[in-house]
Amino acid sequence: MVVADEQSYEEVISKLQTYTQKVQEAESEITEAGNTCVEKTEEDPGIVSNNGKLQKAMTEIDSALESIGKIISELQEELEEIRRINAQAQED
């Protein structure tokens, strides 16, 4: 019986976690920059409007990151099942 490689799963999970972390860091910087811009321009209506668009985009990115988090969880569950199967195969 051929079973998926545990290391491959671990690598994919790690890369997704790293990607998520980097996007969250960038998202935080973008949000901070937008808010700073609003403050520095004394709440210029055009800047406020554009910052609102940025914040909406950040919400959409958060939703995508949540989906990635679910995928990571599913992959971790599959990895645990693979480990269980591999352990059983070694016992036989």
Image (cartoon, rainbow, N blue to C red):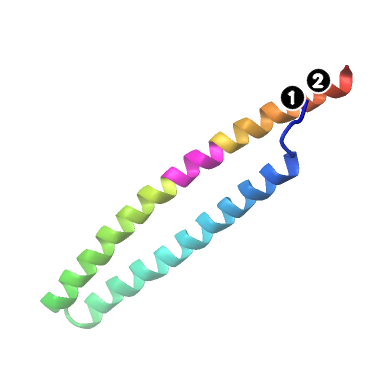
Q: Quadrant of residue 46?
A: bottom left
Q: Which residue sits at x=40%, y=64%?
A: 27
Q: Which mark is residue 84?
A: 1
Q: Which residue sits at x=20%, y=82%?
A: 41
Q: Quadrant of the C terminus?
A: top right
Q: Which residue is tagged 2?
A: 88
* Residue 43 visible in image: no
Image: magenta residue range: 67-73
Choose between 89 and 83: the one closer to the eye.
89
User: In the rendered picture of this protein, how many numbered marks are placed on residues?
Assistant: 2
Q: Is residue 7 left or right of residue 50?
A: right
The kind of secondary structure element at disc 1 is: helix
Q: Position of residue 39 (x, y in %)?
A: 23, 77
Q: Quadrant of residue 48?
A: bottom left
Farthest-out residue, bottom: 41
Q: Which residue sits at x=71%, y=36%?
A: 4
- Given the image, on which type of amino acid does mark 2 rest? Gln
Q: Position of residue 73 (x, y in %)?
A: 55, 37
Q: Is residue 29 left or right of residue 51?
A: right
Farthest-out residue, left: 45
